[in-house]
Amino acid sequence: MTPSPSFTAAAWERTADVRGAVERCAFLAELAEGTLDPVAFRHYLEQDALYLQGYARALSLLAARAPDAGAAGFWASSAHGAAVVESSLHGDLLDSGLLPPGEGTAALASPTTLGYVSHLVATAATAPYAVGAAAVLPCFWVYADAGRRLAVRARLVEGHPFARWVAAYDDPAFQAATATARDLVDAAARPEVEEAMHEAFAVATRYEWLFWEAAHRREGWPPIEG
């Protein structure tokens, strides 16, 4: 008898169409080749810095609701990493002089950024713990998967302008954290919440794709007419 796949393996398979769209995403293709417009990369970093603030809140909520000390410690450590370590990397890149200057005003969360953050925080705060854990997993896993593929291509480009960012998400520590997050989600999965977990995972995976698409077109709020 063939054993049933784990929840995370099934969720990965069920989102194959969206992940295919991620692999075809122009933003990531140009990022891998080093040809991405620096203005688009700045827009992405500014939005991602705002996203990470909300993501850290979602991870902190999961830590508070975790079923054991090990899970609580991992989510809390990940929240710290998102709020401090990754945000520091973004700040360094934005101030590196390699990118065009910003507009001089604080960046405003785009509709996609606001939607994604709202989904994660609301799910982590109000849904069962297992559903919240499933919702935050794509940010680990989709990034780790994309980072691994990007790194292979970027290493072929001499003097790649975005090499530091690509390397951060192909880092063995980040890949290991992704594996731990998968294990925690699988451990939390229960039949009575499994479909809600799949929905939360699928929505977040779609937002991962939309986030890169929005960055490529430098999405903002439309002007108010009249």
Image (cartoon, grey):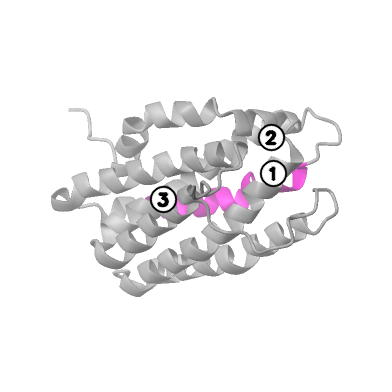
First along the sequence among labels 1 and 3:
1
In this rendering, the answer to whether 103 lies above or below 64 is: above
The residue that mark 2 highlights is 31
Residue farthest to the left, as pictured: 192
Q: Is residue 56 left or right of residue 34?
A: left
Residue under label 3, please give it.
137
Q: Which residue lies under the disc numbered 1?
A: 41
The quadrant holding residue 30 is: top right
Place of residue 124 in the rendered image (x, y in percent of width and height, measured from the top left): 33, 63
Name the chief secondary structure element in magenta: helix
Q: Which residues are magenta?
A: 162-183
**Residue 198 lies in the magenta-colored region:** no
Question: Quadrant location of residue 127?
Answer: bottom left
114 to the left or right of 158: left
Q: Residue at x 70, y 59 (%)?
A: 89
Instruction: Label 3: state its secondary structure.
Output: helix
User: Mark 3 Cα within 10 Å, few/some/many (few <14, many 20+)?
Assistant: many
Q: Which-is-in-front pick, marks 3 and 2?
A: 2
Residues at circles 1 and 2 in contact by the CB criterion of under 8 Å: yes
- Residue at position x 43%, y 43% in the image: 207
Residue type for callout 3: Leu
Q: Is residue 148 visible?
A: yes
Query: Closer to us: mark 1 or mark 2?
Result: 1
Q: Nearer the viewer, mark 1 or mark 3?
A: 1
Q: Residues within 10 Å of mark 1 (few under 14, many from 20)?
A: many
**Vertical side of 190 occupied by 62: above or below:** below
